[in-house]
Image (cartoon, rainbow, N blue to C red):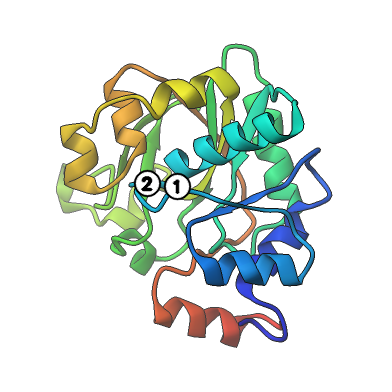
Amino acid sequence: MLGEKPMIQWVYERASSLFDHLLVATDDQGIYDAVERFGGKVQMTSARHKSGTDRCAEAAGLYEQQTGLAFSHVVNIQGDEPLIQAEQLQILIDCIQIPGTGIATLIRPLEAEEELGNPNMVKVVVDQSFKALYFSRAPIPFVRSSGAEQKHANIPFYTHIGLYAFRREILEQVVKLPLSALEQAESLEQLRWMEHGITIRTAVTHLPSLGVDTPEDLELIRKQQSF
């Protein structure tokens, strides 16, 4: 709970104005019941999924079967991002509509040295067109020259915000790919897609976002924000 609402409700309400269809995908009965109580749409999915992307793909397919609709794009919003804002989601929507883009995601400039060393905050290096080169839980890029500290290097450091937009056919493609070595090493599914040659385009947001990965994260959000 955050204030008088469950965390998933904050995420759902902040996203609701931007999409033609918004659906919570879960294998948890408690989450399912919570979404129904506040009037949201929810789809029960398999408990066997190893990633949110797999769950998202199943839910999208089931919803298309139930409604007779066919979607051009699917956006996967994490239910543990209660600070997500509509402006950030609009940046992601604009990014996926750039011609030739199959997958889009958001990144944010790192603001504090402790963020760089936090393995729960995924770092990303991008090329000059803001296509992702690599994602890691380690501090990247590593600054080697002259013993310079990472935080004083004259290069940008970015952290990944775990939101993805997919062209519908690309979503179906990535969930059929076998697990990869880099993905298993870092526990980051996007590395599987990149290892198979799929490009991920990133877009920068400067708005704060904090995923709730630990009980400490939850307490931090409760202290920093008024819910």
Q: Mark 1 — residue?
A: 52
Q: Point out the frontmost of discs 1 and 2.
A: 2
Residue 129 visible within the image:
no
At which x and y percent is residue 148? Answer: 22, 52
Residue 24 vs 97, above or below: the answer is below
Q: The C terminus appears in which quarter of the rendering? A: bottom right
Answer few, some or many: residues within 10 Å of disc 2's Cα (few below 14, many 20 plus, some between 14 and 19): few
Which residue is at the front of the view, 133 or 170?
A: 170
Pointer 1 with pointer 2, Cβ within 8 A: yes
Residue 159 vs 124, above or below: the answer is below
Q: Mark 2 — residue?
A: 49
- Residue shown at 80% from the left, 44% from the top: 18
Q: Is residue 184 left or right of residue 86?
A: left
- Residue shown at 28% from the left, 42% from the top: 141
Which residue is at the front of the view, 64 or 18?
A: 64
Identify which amino acid the numbered label 1 is placed on: Gly
Identify which amino acid the numbered label 2 is placed on: His
- Residue shown at 38% from the left, 64% from the top: 115
Q: Is residue 27 left or right of residue 40?
A: left
Which residue is at the front of the view, 64 or 196?
A: 64
Q: Is residue 121 left or right of residue 164?
A: left
Q: Secondary structure at mark 1?
A: helix
CA separation, marks 1 and 2? 7 Å
At which x and y percent is residue 195? Answer: 27, 24
> Which of the 4 image quarters holds residue 117?
bottom left
Residue 74 visible within the image:
yes
At which x and y percent is residue 114? Answer: 35, 69
